[in-house]
Image (cartoon, helix red, strand yellow):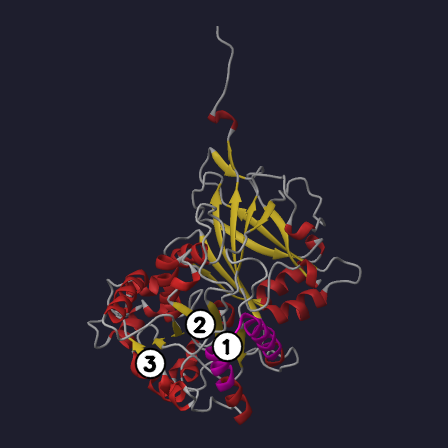
Amino acid sequence: MPRTKNPVVILHGWSDTSDSFLPLSGFLKANGFQAVNLFLGDYISMADDVSIADAAKALESALRAKIAGGELKTPVDLIVHSTGGLVSRAWLSSYYTGTAPDAMPVERLVMIAPANFGSHLATVGQTILGRIAKGWGHGFHTGKLMLDGLELGSPFQWELACRDLFAIDTDKPGTIYGEALIWPFVLVGSMPYQSGLRKMVNESGCDGTVRVAAANLNAYGATLDFTRQDAPTVLGMSAHNNDSAVAHGSFIPWRHKYGEDLEFPLAVLPHRDHASITDPTIRGDNESAQEQADFQNFLLAALACPSFADYQALQREWRKYSDQVQDPEAADDDHHMHMQINAFVVDEYQNPVGDYMIEFIAPNYEQNTDLTGVFHDQVIRDVHKCEQNAALRTIYFDRQRMFELFYGGMDAGQPKELRLSISAAAPGDKIRYFLDAFGAKGEFVVHSDQEADRWLRRNATHFLKIVIPRIPAADVFTLRNAP
C-alpha cells in the first residue's frame, strides 16, 4: 500500500533544543505539510545522569501519552538530528523489534547529520574545556552518559548495532527496517566549520561534528578469528605472506537483520556543516542556489517517498549525487571519501585485550616499508582508543589517499591489497598471544583495489571483532610419570 503524509516528529541532538528546528518546521509547512501535525520533541541531554537509553524510554512514554490523549495517531515520520539518531534507534529497537508492520509507530526515519557511530567531539565534551563551554548554565553538567554513548567506538554503539543492524544473535532475529517497516534516510554535510573557534575541531570528511562515515547507517561487521583456520580469509582472497610464524585468521562476515539486498539512502551535501544542515531555508557557506535546492528536494522527497520502489530509486540517485560531490579531483581533503573501522579485540575466552597494535601493510611489506609508512602517516587520519574500554579502537582513514598514495605507489605486477596485521603484548610471563612471544601477530587481507574484493566500503563504519589465541607456557601444566 502506498504511504501517505504522516504526522512529523522532530528530535534534536545533544546540548540542543527543539527551538533550533522552528525554521525546518516552517519550511515543511510551506511545502504542503500544514495538513499534518508537526511535533517538536525535547529531551534532557545535558544532565549527567541521563543516558541515551533513558531518553529513548522517555520518548516511548511521551508518545504513548499523546496517543492516549487523542493528539497523535501513528504511524509518524521522524526527523532526527545528531544524537537524535541514536535516541531514535535505541527507542525503536528496544520497543519495536519484530513488530508487525501495521503496529510499527514510524514509517520514514529521516536522519539529518546523525551521530549513528559517534562523534570525535564526544570526548572533548567531557573535558574541563567542554564543561566550561557547554556546561555553563547547566551546573557544569555536560551529559556524561550521553557523551559516553557518543564516544567513537563506544560499547553502547556496539550493543545498538548488534540490536538493530546485525544478525549475530540468532535468538533475536527481528528487525525494524525493511520494505513494510521503517525506511531510513541519511542526509549529512561534508563541509567543516568555516568560522569561529569551532574551526579548531575540524577534520576532513566531516561536517565539523559528525563524520560522513559515522553518519551513514549502512554499516558492515565481521569477526576475524585467529583461533580457527577452517574458513577463508576475506572474500576468498588467498595471497599471503608465506612466513609460517604469521597466523591467518578465519573471516566471518556478519549478516544484516534486514537482508543483504537493502541499502539505505545516503546523501552527502558539500556545503553544509553540522549546524547549517538543520535549516534548509538558508544557504550554507559557498553553497549555490542549485545545491540549496538539491538539499530541499532531498528532504521533501524522503518525507513524501510513496513506495519501496521509489525508496530504492532514491538510494541510487543519492549515491550518484554523493559520488559526484566527493570528486577525486578535488584539490582539498574536505570532500574525500573516508572509512572507519571499529575494532574490538578479545582473547579466545572473550576477555577484552587492551594492549595491542593494529598495522596496515602491503604485500611483501618487508621490501616496501615506505608504503607502510605512507599508509600510517598520510592515509590514516585518526586512531581513537575508547576511554571506556581500551579493547575498543576506532581507526579513521582517507579512502582517496589510499588509492592515490598507497595503491598508486605499488610496483606493477604486485598484488594491490591492503592487509591488516595485529600484534598483542603478552598478559604475563606464563601466557602469550599467538605462537611467538616476540613479534607475535596475525594478518589478513582487508581490502583490494578490485571492487569485488573489498570489505571496506566508502563512507561507512565497519565493526571488526578480532579473536586472538592465548598460548599457555609449557610449564603451566605438565605430566610426569608416577614413581
Q: What secondary structure is marked by label 3?
A: loop
Q: Earlier in the sequence, mark 1 or mark 3?
A: 3
Front residue of 306 and 324: 306
Q: Image height check: is 337 above or below 342?
A: below
Indicate the secondary structure of the residue bearing disc 2.
Answer: strand
Q: Is residue 384 above or below residue 112?
A: above
How far apart, in angstroms, are the residues tagged by discs 1 and 3? 18 Å
The amino acid at mark 3 is: Asn
Q: Which mark is residue 90?
A: none
Where disc 1 sits, the SS reads loop
Mark on residue 305? 1
User: Main structural element of the magenta stretch: helix, strand or loop?
Assistant: helix
Is 370 drawn above or below residue 404 in the view shown? above
Give the mark nearest the N terminus, 3 or 2: 3
- Is 228 a magenta residue? no
- Give the x, y percent position of residue 278: 40, 82
Q: Earlier in the sequence, mark 2 or mark 1?
A: 2
Which region is colored magenta? 296-322
Query: Residue extending furthest right?
Result: 413
Q: Residue furthest top?
A: 483
Q: Position of residue 366 (x, y in %)?
A: 69, 53
**Residue kind at label 1, given as amino acid type:** Cys
Which residue of the protein is positioned furthest toward the front in this rendering? Answer: 1
Disc 3 from disc 2: Cα separation: 15 Å
Check residue 108 in the rendering and tell me which mark sits there, or answer none. 2
Q: Is residue 482 visible?
A: yes
Which residue is disc 3 drawn over? 37
Report the Cα–Cα distance between label 2 and label 1: 8 Å
Location of residue 69 (image quadrant)? bottom left
